[in-house]
């Protein structure tokens, strides 16, 4: 089985995967345990995948973790104090991902690597911004209606 991208590129993305651990730890210190746990799981799956990026179950697990974590954070951000910052940084991350995909398809791997590393950075910025403010519980909101 061949690598999704060559090691000289993947090692940079692997290194940027570690910033999600920092945002997860920050989330735990701010008391956002549920979201921080999801973020930490995403860190683990990202490191597991990017240490040797092959097509298969590790890639599928990483993608699934990212999707679940992103959707969960987006839902919780809706009425959060810094939800607007979360959405802005996530939009930058989505644009960075689209650029990464485009440049990979055009065989511009260093540019694709740069943009995919940007996905990791913007995800970190978005979660730190979210965790820095108050995040109301979804259960409390629905109970008060």
Image (cartoon, rainbow, N blue to C red):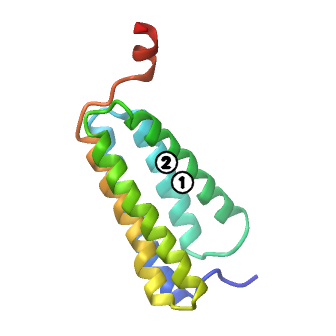
Quadrant position of the C terminus in the picture? top left
The residue singled out by tag 1 in the image is: 66
User: Residue 70, labelled with which disc?
Assistant: 2
Number of residue marks: 2
Can residue 116 be seen in this snapshot? yes
Q: Nearer the viewer, residue 28 or 4?
A: 4
- Where is residue 101 shown, x and y percent of the image? 55, 76
- Where is residue 28 shown, x and y percent of the image? 33, 39
Secondary structure under tag 1 reads: helix
**Distance from the alpha carbon under mark 1 to that under mark 2:** 6 Å
Residue drawn at x 39%, y 23% as measured from the top left: 137
Q: Nearer the viewer, residue 106 or 119?
A: 106
Q: Nearer the viewer, residue 3 or 119?
A: 119
Secondary structure under tag 2 reads: helix
- Where is residue 66 shown, x and y percent of the image? 54, 54
In the displayed structure, does residue 67 sit left or right of residue 83?
Answer: right
Residue 104 lies, with reference to residue 84, above or below; the image says below
Residue drawn at x 65%, y 65% as measured from the top left: 59
- Where is residue 63 shown, x and y percent of the image? 61, 58
- Dots 1, 2 in contact, CB < 8 A: yes
Q: Quadrant of residue 117?
A: bottom left
Residue 39 lies, with reference to residue 145, above or below; the image says below
Residue drawn at x 59%, y 59% as measured from the top left: 62
Residue that sits furthest to the top in the current view? 144
Q: Quadrant of residue 51?
A: bottom right
In the displayed structure, does residue 51 sit left or right of residue 33?
Answer: right
Quadrant position of the N terminus in the picture? bottom right
Query: Could you classify mark 1 by the number of other residues whose Cα lies within 10 Å: few (under 14), some (14-19), or many (20 or more)?
Result: many
């Amino acid at each position: 089985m061949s690598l999704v991208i060559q090691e000289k590129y993947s090692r940079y993305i692997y290194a940027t995967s570690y910033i999600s651990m920092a945002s997860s730890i920050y989330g735990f210190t701010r008391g956002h345990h549920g979201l921080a746990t999801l973020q930490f799981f995403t860190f683990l799956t990202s490191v597991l995948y990017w240490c040797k990026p092959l097509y298969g179950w590790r890639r599928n697990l990483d993608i699934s973790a990212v999707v679940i974590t992103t959707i969960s954070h987006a839902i919780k951000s809706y009425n959060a104090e810094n939800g607007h910052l979360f959405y802005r940084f996530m939009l930058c991350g989505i644009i960075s991902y689209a650029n990464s995909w485009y440049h990979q398809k055009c065989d511009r791997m260093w540019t694709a690597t740069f943009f995919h590393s940007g996905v990791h950075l913007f995800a970190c910025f978005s979660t730190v911004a979210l965790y820095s403010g108050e995040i109301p519980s979804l259960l409390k909101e629905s109970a008060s209606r």
